Amino acid sequence: SQWEKLQKDDSDSGQLKGLSAYTHVELPYYSKFILIAAYLASYNPARTDKRFFLKHHGKIKKTNFLKKHEKTSNHLLGPKPFPLDRLLAILYSIVDSRVAPTANIFSQITSLVTLQLLTLVSHDDQLEGPKYKCTVSLDFIRAVARTVNFDIIKYLYDFL
């Protein structure tokens, strides 16, 4: 009877583990910031980078900033592909300490692709370099951002 109870407990927790394992992924410190930067690059238009990530970008009025044809939320449209250069530029602007573009950073990006948190959408043989998409949900990225004390909602274009 103890064996049957143990098997039943394992099968019940196995279903819960499968569901909650994706929401509680342990990542290295910079991988969390890379994932946050990838999410911001996927869901924010490229023209908004100056507003969100430069300290002295000048005053931009919200009425002039929003286009009339942009009524659809970027979160409803899904993630957009972004180049590696944009990902690194956003990463360097959101991380407090200076991060050198070392092999460690690039290997962590590759690890995030292996974990299927990022998707490589272009081939390496193109001249402009690789493009990625972020495949995580808003709830997941908010949980990751909370672990490093980063307010991601403040940087999302849809929540202006």
Image: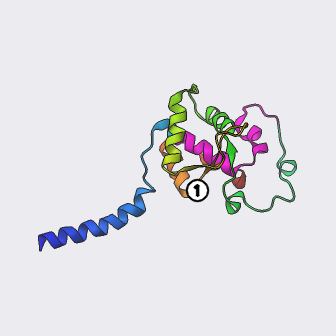
Tell me what residue is drawn at x 49 percent, y 42 percent. 111
Query: In this image, 23 relative to 160: left or right?
Result: left
Residue 98 among those drawn in magenta? no
What colouring method underlies this structural image?
Answer: rainbow
Residue 40 among those drawn in magenta? yes
Residue 15 visible? The answer is yes
Q: Is residue 40 above or below residue 92?
A: below
Position of residue 115 measured from the top left corner of the image (x, y, whole percent): 48, 49
Q: Is residue 77 above or below residue 85?
A: below
What stretch of residues is rendered in magenta?
Answer: 32-58
Q: Quadrant of the N terminus?
A: bottom left
The residue indicated by pointer 1 is 138
Tell me what residue is drawn at x 49 percent, y 47 percent. 114
Q: Is residue 5 above or below residue 92?
A: below
> Which is the main secondary structure of the residues drawn in magenta?
helix
Amino acid at the residue labelled 1: Leu
Residue 72: which quarter of the image?
Answer: bottom right
Q: Residues within 10 Å of mark 1 (few under 14, many from 20)?
A: few
Query: In this image, 46 relative to 32: left or right?
Result: right
113 or 38: nearer the eye? Answer: 113
Tell me what residue is drawn at x 69 percent, y 52 percent. 80
